[in-house]
Image (spheres, rainbow, N blue to C red):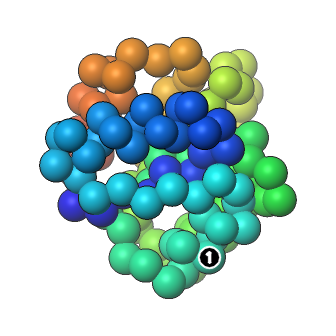
Amino acid sequence: MRILIAEDDTIIADGLSRSLRQGGYAVDWAPNGVEADTALVTVSYDLLILDLGLPKMSGLEVLKRLRARNSQLPVLILTARDTWREKVAGIDAGADDYLTKPFHMEELLARLRALIRRA
């Protein structure tokens, strides 16, 4: 199971990567939207964890481009943006789930397992 983490905060990305690898997942990291979009075109992933506040290209734009390519890749938005309007915009853009920061790792892992089961 291969997961892409698109997250510009290195501390969060490192913690997520370590936890996911301990859980048996293969993990790649993209620190900005351009690198995330490129990785999604060139590598086959089973799930995307996507921050909305990415530099160079927003997470929402990465998501829109992914869905424009007709990708069915499960996407979990993980962001500090917590208003209901931002949540609706993320889901309407094609996200499968939306989790706000700060978060509990156990909740994130449970949501990932649910998304993987559905896929």
The reply, left or right, for residue 53 in relation to residue 78 is right
Residue appearing at x 25%, y 29% in the figure = 110
In the image, residue 108 sits, relative to residue 18, either above or below, namely above
Locate residue 106: give its quadrant.
top left
Locate residue 43: give its quadrant.
bottom left
**Type of amino acid under label 1:** Thr
Quarter of the image with the N terminus is bottom left
Q: Residue 119 in the image: x percent, y percent? A: 24, 58
Q: Secondary structure at mark 1?
A: helix
Residue appearing at x 39%, y 43% in the figure = 17
Residue 64 appears in the rendering: no
Residue lying at the far right in this picture: please name it: 56
In the image, residue 68 sits, relative to residue 108, either above or below, namely below
Residue lying at the far bottom in this picture: please name it: 42
Residue appearing at x 23%, y 52% in the figure = 25
Residue named by callout 1: 38
